[in-house]
Amino acid sequence: MCRIVLLACVAVAALLAKAPVHAGEKTTAVPALVVRVQSLNALMQNLGLVVKLVGQEEVANQIEGLVKSKIGVKGLEGVDPTRAFGAYVRFGKAIDEINGAMLVPITDQKTFLKLLDTLDVQITKDKDDIYTYKTNKNVDVYFRFAHKYLFITSLSTESIRDKNLLDPAKALGGGVATISLVAQIDQIPKKAKLIAIAQLGDAIIAAQKQAGANETKAQEQFRIALLRDINRHGNSLIRETKEIRFDLDIDEKTKELAVQAQIFPVPGSELAKTIDALGKLKSPLAGLTGNNAAFHGAIHLAFPETLTKSLGAVIDEAVEKSLDGIQNPLKKKQADTLFKAILPSAKAGEYQLVALAIGPKKNRYTFLGAMKLTDGEKLGNALHNLLKEAINDVPPEQRDKFKLDIDKVGTISIHRLEVPRTPALAKVIDDVVGDNQLHFAFRNDAVFFALGEDALATIKALLVNKTPATSVPMLFDFDIARMASLIAQTPEQRKLARTLFPAGETGRIRASVNGGASLTARLQMRLSVLEFLAKVKDANGE
């Protein structure tokens, strides 16, 4: 096992130092890339915790037994399992000026060297206290001791000479996550960025030349506008990103797994303004949530003006073709009226969808949906008139399936229609929803839908709330604890759900993307959720 660990160090060191530093030239003091692990103890403890939670206790015990039998009860002698370890890479002014090293915390230099001798690892030492290990893969490994750490590299000893050594406190400090990766993009040589920008530009030009089958002029212009926007944002990311950070953490106290990726822009740059704008999105639909939500999903997008304009041309073209295909004058007039009411929302350039599942209440859920509109009242009136005309053509015995103006909130009318009880939907309606009456209403800024036993009361409450709140570009929030009764199929699984999610206990999986000072993507998961899903999957034989 020790030899495996050492060979892993060799592999990492080779990756971290692909090119030698030019002798005598000083590299930048700030590492461009840092990989940090909280400690060997923390890594093994969290790995064991996750393995056991997913029902692999036997595997965890085997790993523990193998480690003790191969390494010994004392572990890697001379290595400190309580301190951070990791690796770093630094760049010089030239694109091929790279140095880096892997850092392993050491408690005692002599003890570690004795361990290598016990493992029959043949090493030599030069006058600068740099050790060499010649592998059978034509890749030599160099290491030295400094600052209570072992510095490991390959291909060249320049990376671990005194002038190029980095203080471990600077390289590995400042992190609290179990595993962190930090890339200082502003430390990457300018020539490397220019190469990346050129390659992106070539890819965009190639994509612009690839027209789709039967592509119209409007569709072509939209595709090119979209590709140009991608190129613009790609250039901005390469030129104006200061730092990219990735963190993975398992908190044993809160019993949560968290994965987070962040992009920090150069202050004052166009990228900074774009990311900041994402953090300032506001909408009255952002307030559609609640403590009793089993699911909350939302997406909120705002297109740039150039893209919005070209998309509008595609929409106009599609509407024109649709109208040309309608031969019946009355139906054509109805379609034209409906299209004119929809177009302001379709061409607005800002789109938002929100979906929620509220419950359970007596093992049933109420499902809600909302979509941002422009001139929603105009669309609501147009649809109301069309439905009213359509209902007159429906046989009398079927008219109860469509009910207009069943209730009001101020001047806003609420309508209802019956969802057909098809074989595919019947079980869902009976076991999950409890009611097949879909309620909907148009407010000037949005359309709302509600399905379930509490649909009418819920949609009335939604229509009253018009206060704008901070929105997010993307949100997925799922509470397994509230959905466990649906997921669990057997008495054993339902018992497991009650054990892992006692009354008042949440079981959330939350994924989100947000702006502000950084562009942040975050995933949070309760460890009890991981355990529940793994054991349910095993029980189902999947």
Image (cartoon, rainbow, N blue to C red):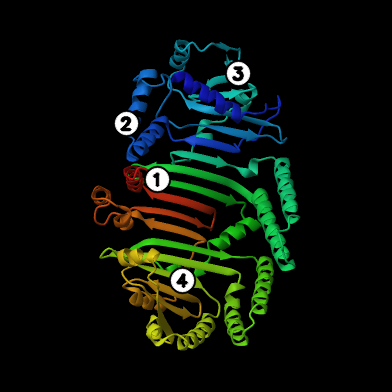
Q: Amino acid at mark 4?
A: Ala
**Mark 1 residue crowding within 10 angstroms, few (<14) / some (14–19) / many (20+):** some
Q: CA distance from mark 4 to mark 3?
A: 61 Å
Task: Say whether disc 4 or disc 1 marks the residue closer to the N-terminus.
Answer: 1
Residue 396 quadrant: bottom left
Task: Say whether disc 2 or disc 4 marks the residue closer to the N-terminus.
Answer: 2
Q: What residue sits 34% from the left and 54% below the top? A: 480
**Mark 2 residue crowding within 10 angstroms, few (<14) / some (14–19) / many (20+):** few
What label sits on residue 257 in the rendered view? 1
What label sits on residue 58 in the rendered view? 2
Q: Quadrant of the C terminus?
A: top left
Reply above or below: 389 against 58.
Answer: below
Q: What residue sits 60% from the left and 77% below the top? A: 344
Q: CA distance from mark 4 to mark 1?
A: 31 Å
Asked whether residue 407 is in view, the answer is no
Q: Amino acid at mark 1?
A: Leu
Residue 315 quadrant: bottom right
What label sits on residue 524 in the rendered view? none
Q: What residue sits 31% from the left and 72% below the top? A: 453
Q: Amino acid at mark 2?
A: Glu
Across and down, in percent, residue 386 comes to 51, 85
Q: Which residue is mark 3?
A: 137
Q: Quadrant of the N terminus?
A: top left
**CB under 8 Å between discs 1 and 3:** no
* Nearest to the observer: residue 541 or residue 520: 541
Residue 458 quadrant: bottom left
Q: What residue sits 50% from the left and 33% below the top? A: 169
